[in-house]
Amino acid sequence: MSSKIENVTILIVEDNVSNFVLMARMLGHMGLQCEWKTSGHEVVEYADTLGRVDLILMDIRLPYEDGYQALQKLRGHERLMNVPVVAVTAYASEDQMRRAEKEGFDGFVGKPLNPDRFPDQIRRMLNGVPVWEIE
């Protein structure tokens, strides 16, 4: 899939700096802009300040409010309710993936991220193709 993706903003909600840097570098190589929030707390308020948000990559285990709580707030916000939110977690299992789907996430990617597959996963997400992958 080689469709050119431009003027895209991805919000990464991740409390681990190393994980954020890795994602930001891979997205940067794709020519995509990303923003960063370290917790689910106030993620709606922060996302609302951005000009646009095309995709949210959300860790599930976050300080203050976890990814599930943050997702519910996003789904309740008129401007952000339809933005795809993908769970990105080190606690990747079939059970976690099923729970994420049941709770309303639009996809699931397990950590550690695979640098060879991540760009394709992002392209698929941005093209509206759900990604549900544990590894």
Image: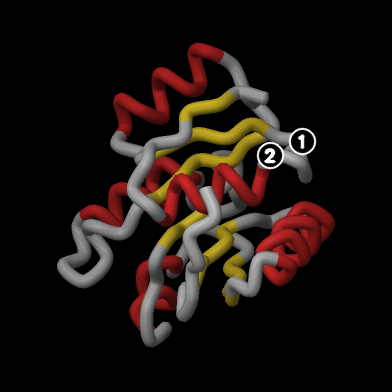
Q: How many marks?
A: 2
The spot of residue 132 in percent (x, y) is: 48, 28
**Mark 2 residue crowding within 10 angstroms, few (<14) / some (14–19) / many (20+):** few
SS for tag 1? loop
Whether residue 58 can be seen here: no
Query: Residue 131: in sight, yes or no?
Result: yes
Q: Residue at x 73, y 60 (%)?
A: 26
Image height check: is 72 above or below 54? above
Mark number displayed over residue 117: 2
- Could you say where residue 55 lies in the image, as x and y percent from the top left? 43, 60
Labels 2, 1: front one: 2
In front of the other: 25 or 124: 124
Residue count near mark 1 (Cα–Cα under 10 Å), binned few <14, some 14–19, many ≥20: some
Whether residue 64 sits left or right of residue 46 in the image: it is right
Residue 114 x, y percent position in the rendering: 75, 38
The quarter of the picture where residue 117 lies is top right
Give the residue at x 66% y 66%. 30
| Residue that carries the numbered disc 1 in the rendered image | 112
Amino acid tagged 2: Arg
Mark 2 residue element: loop
Q: Is residue 2 left or right of residue 115?
A: left
Give the residue furthest to the top.
94
Q: Nearer the viewer, residue 55 or 104?
A: 55
Front residue of 28/22: it is 28
Position of residue 1 in the picture relative to residue 100 (left or right) = right
Q: Quadrant of residue 105?
A: top left
Of the numbered discs 2 and 1, the one sitting upstream in the chain is 1
